């Protein structure tokens, strides 16, 4: 039986209590327990199939357990109990019996389990072999593939008669015939032919001191091949200094060409003037500037009336085009409103603005001649506040108005 699945049946064989015959009629009651729990009445349907066999169509919820016991009770019949053990997989699934952890395809088919047709598949051995296929090794193989980096380097190796270089000029000199002279068969014969006197081939003592036995030994059959093999085949021919080769670049050589006499930088340096007037070859301009400097004098003394005589400055002539502008500025100043004066004694040295305002306020605003108490002429502002006053006296017929003081 499948767990928690509907449309499943449990069968019972019912026999009579009286004589053991098949019970073929009646209304049976089915009870069930799940995992040893409390017994409950089943909700399914019981049907007599024939010869005392009864089928019970179970309700889905009644199968939701690991052990389900079914008991059929029928009047005049012996009660029967059937034990079932529901499973979660699907026995009717011919591919993977309902287990989602397995592929839903036949073994060895697309999407199915991998199998070994020959048998003896060792997964550990296969894993070890697979671990050898690293990204680094694959990258190296990629370099070897046609068009890869290493392949391109191999393709670039020259195949001319001059091995290891593309210099056609050098190849024409280092011919097969000349290289053959350096092989093991010829060098011993050539060395043996060298005279054995103290001075090989000459009586020059000076030359003999240079061509020593040790130096001549460098030319024997054991050394020459090794020396030839040591000749570098890098882009920097004739030296083993990779550092020097990397420093002597075409860009730097081009810069040195500019510095050579007649080059671009050299011509620019030659064009820089060395006269007192830097940056120009005009001696006349230099003389004129020196005269201007003398006229101005130290700290500009020749330009100011205070520090100099002022005779170097001339009066600026008036331009009639300025008339309208000056008139406009004057009108703007006249038309500007003047504020009233505050409370206080008028100064003896007023500005035109404050002087005119005091007279305007005295004429326009309220004024009072005080005769009760201290006689005084009082000047008020527009709000009726005294801003200033003049004391008045009349002694023996002499009338005096004193200097105005604060109100």
Image (cartoon, grey):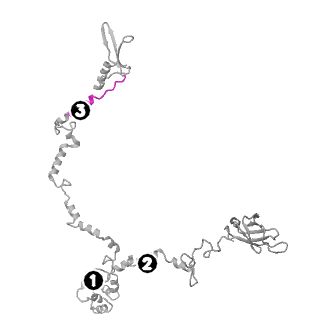
Q: Residue at x 55, y 78 (%)?
A: 109
Q: Residue furthest right?
A: 18
Q: In the image, which is nearer the foreground, mark 1 or mark 2?
A: 2
Q: Position of residue 236 (x, y in %)?
A: 31, 76
18 left or right of 69 in image: right
Q: CA distance from mark 3 to mark 2?
A: 92 Å
- State the quadrant of the C terminus: top left
Q: Nearer the viewer, residue 120 or 307?
A: 120
Q: Earlier in the sequence, mark 3 or mark 1?
A: 1
Classify mark 2: helix, strand or loop: helix
Q: Which residue is mark 3?
A: 328
Q: Residue at x 49, y 77 (%)?
A: 133
Q: CA distance from mark 1 to mark 2?
A: 34 Å
Give the quadrant of residue 216: bottom left
Q: In the image, which is nearer the foreground, mark 3 or mark 1?
A: 3
How many marks the image carries: the answer is 3
Q: Is residue 323 above or below residue 239?
A: above
Give the quadrant of residue 268: bottom left
- State the quadrant of the N terminus: bottom right
Q: Is residue 334 magenta?
A: yes
Q: Position of residue 395 (x, y in %)?
A: 32, 8
Q: Nearer the viewer, residue 113 or 200?
A: 113
Q: Is residue 390 above or below residue 146?
A: above
Q: Residue at x 21, y 66 (%)?
A: 263
Q: Which residue is mark 2?
A: 141
Q: Which residue is mark 1?
A: 171
Q: Position of residue 209 (x, y in %)?
A: 27, 84
Q: Which residues are magenta?
A: 324-343
Classify mark 1: helix, strand or loop: helix
């Amino acid at each position: 039986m499948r767990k928690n699945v509907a449309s499943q049946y449990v069968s019972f064989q019912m026999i009579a209590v009286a004589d053991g015959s098949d019970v073929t009629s009646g209304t049976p009651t089915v009870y069930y327990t799940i995992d040893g729990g409390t017994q409950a009445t089943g909700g399914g349907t019981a049907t007599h199939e024939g010869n005392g066999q009864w089928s019970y169509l179970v309700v889905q919820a009644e199968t939701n357990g690991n052990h389900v016991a079914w008991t059929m009770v029928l009047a005049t019949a012996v009660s029967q109990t059937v034990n079932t053990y529901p499973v979660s997989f699907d026995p009717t699934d011919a591919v993977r019996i309902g287990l989602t952890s397995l592929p839903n395809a036949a073994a060895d088919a697309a999407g199915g389990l991998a199998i070994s047709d020959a048998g003896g598949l060792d997964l550990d051995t296969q894993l070890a072999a697979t671990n050898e296929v690293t990204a680094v090794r694959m990258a190296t193989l990629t370099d070897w593939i046609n068009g890869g980096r290493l392949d391109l380097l191999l393709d670039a190796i020259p195949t001319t008669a001059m091995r290891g270089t593309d210099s056609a000029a050098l190849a024409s000199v280092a011919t097969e015939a000349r290289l053959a002279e350096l092989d093991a068969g010829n060098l011993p014969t050539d060395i043996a032919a060298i005279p054995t006197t103290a001075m090989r081939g000459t009586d020059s003592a000076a030359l003999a001191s240079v061509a020593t036995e040790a130096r001549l030994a460098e030319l024997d059959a054991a050394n020459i091949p090794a020396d030839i093999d040591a000749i570098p085949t890098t882009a920097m021919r004739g030296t083993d200094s990779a550092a020097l080769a990397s420093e002597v670049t075409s860009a730097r050589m081009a810069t040195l060409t500019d510095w050579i006499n007649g080059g671009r930088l050299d011509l620019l340096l030659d064009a820089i003037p060395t006269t007192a007037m830097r940056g120009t070859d005009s001696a006349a301009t230099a003389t004129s500037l020196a005269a201007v400097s003398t006229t101005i004098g130290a700290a500009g003394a020749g330009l100011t009336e205070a520090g100099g005589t002022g005779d170097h400055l001339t009066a600026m002539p008036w331009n009639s085009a300025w008339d309208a502008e000056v008139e406009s500025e004057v009108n703007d100043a006249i038309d500007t409103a003047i504020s009233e004066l505050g409370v206080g004694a008028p100064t003896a040295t007023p500005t035109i603005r404050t002087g005119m305002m005091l007279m305007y306020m005295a004429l326009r605003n309220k004024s009072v001649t005080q005769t009760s108490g201290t006689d005084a002429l009082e000047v008020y502002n527009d709000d009726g506040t005294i801003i200033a006053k003049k004391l008045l006296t009349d002694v023996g017929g002499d009338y005096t108005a004193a200097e105005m003081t604060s109100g």
